[in-house]
């Protein structure tokens, strides 16, 4: 059934005019589940809940959405993370492939519980640096197999832009937020070491949470922009910009020349179709801070970062993707 529907979405992407193809993570329970399913050393019955905002109709009043899996012993890798996904795409994709992987920085914040995890890893940092080689080796394998677009999904950087979550890092995790940010950048850069190839795009996606049309963080990129944009060794930044929660385009002034920003102006959370005129106006606003040839357009996040999806239909999703294609062609054909 997965094969059947992935073939269907590949064909639909081709019909829309895409040049890079994805399986939509349709084999995953969530965007991180490949990691969970490839690692031993976790208690899959445990979880650390997060308070989410928005979409009150979801989960019949539930205030939190649990994130399954706690580290309870030294982790060991049992299999490749994405070989089953990439292999099918290599055989069936109409063109070059995009593969997504979670940032190594995801896991210490959501899988480490003091009093339990510290029996295996005395600090969050020690756990992080055991995750790094697993993500790094998967990226290396994908590039060696000819994958042309690697996207690291890194919602955890939102902890450094939201004062509430900066407080969580400081008070609950017991770590200085600026030191934690520096280590997060080092960890992601280590995962990308020695994988550069001509024609391969290395990208990172930053969001504020995307689960059943909910989010958990708010705030503009200002507190992290100069450090993040200049130190992360990627070719492109995919940035949420679909709502006021993301702040202004002003932080784009820190993006180095030659790097690209994909403006996530189309909501994956809300069913209402955006106006093409509004999208073109906002792209024009962003181009005041960096060259328009270094900008692109996309949805702000995935339409289903978790198996439950967001509060819109598949038809509404395809209409939004059609809007992205149509708007991009007009903007960059005219640029």
Image: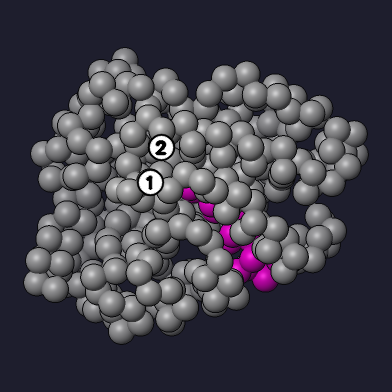
Is there CB contact under 8 Å for labels 2 and 1?
yes
- The stretch of residues the image draws in magenta is 151-166
Q: How many marks?
A: 2
Q: Residue at x 20, y 26 (%)?
A: 8
Q: Residue furthest top?
A: 1
Distance CA(mark 2)–CA(mark 1): 8 Å
Can residue 63 be seen by looking at this rendering?
no
Colour scheme of this structure image?
one colour
| Mark 1 residue crowding within 10 angstroms, few (<14) / some (14–19) / many (20+) | few
Image: 103 above or below 267: above
Depth check, front residue: 33 or 92: 92
In the visual, does 11 lie left or right of 188?
left
In the visual, does 228 lie left or right of 239?
right
Label at residue 66 = none
Residue highlighted by disc 2: 143
In the visual, does 289 lie left or right of 73?
left
Residue 20 at what x, y percent from top left?
Answer: 24, 43
């Amino acid at each position: 059934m997965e094969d059947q529907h992935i073939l269907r979405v590949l064909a639909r992407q081709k019909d829309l005019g895409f040049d890079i193809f994805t399986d939509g993570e349709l084999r995953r329970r969530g965007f991180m589940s490949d990691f969970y399913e490839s690692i031993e050393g976790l208690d899959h019955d445990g979880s650390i809940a997060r308070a989410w905002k928005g979409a009150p109709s979801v989960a019949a009043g539930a205030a939190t959405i649990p994130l399954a899996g706690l580290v309870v012993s030294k982790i060991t890798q049992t299999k490749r993370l994405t070989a089953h996904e990439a292999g099918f795409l290599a055989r069936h994709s109409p063109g070059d492939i995009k593969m997504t992987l979670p940032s190594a920085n995801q896991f210490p914040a959501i899988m480490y519980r003091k009093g339990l995890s510290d029996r295996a890893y005395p600090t969050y940092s020690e756990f992080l640096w055991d995750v790094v080689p697993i993500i790094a080796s998967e990226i290396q394998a994908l590039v060696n197999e000819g994958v042309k677009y690697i996207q690291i999904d890194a919602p955890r950087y939102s902890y450094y832009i939201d004062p509430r979550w900066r407080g969580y890092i400081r008070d609950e995790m017991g770590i200085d937020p600026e030191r934690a940010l520096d280590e997060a950048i080092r960890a992601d850069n280590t995962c990308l070491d020695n994988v550069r190839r001509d024609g391969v795009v290395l990208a990172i996606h930053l969001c504020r949470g995307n689960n059943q049309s909910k989010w958990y963080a708010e705030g503009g990129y200002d507190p992290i922009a100069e450090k993040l944009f200049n130190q992360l060794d990627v070719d492109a930044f995919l940035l949420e910009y679909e709502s006021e929660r993301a702040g202004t385009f002003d932080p784009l002034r820190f993006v180095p020349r030659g790097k690209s920003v994909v403006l996530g102006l189309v909501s994956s959370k809300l069913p209402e179709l955006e106006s093409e005129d509004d999208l073109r106006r906002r792209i024009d606003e962003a181009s005041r801070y960096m060259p328009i040839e270094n900008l692109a357009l996309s949805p702000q996040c995935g339409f289903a970062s978790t198996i439950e999806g967001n509060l819109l239909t598949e038809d509404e999703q395809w209409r939004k993707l059609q809007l992205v294609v149509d708007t991009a062609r007009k903007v960059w054909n005219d640029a």
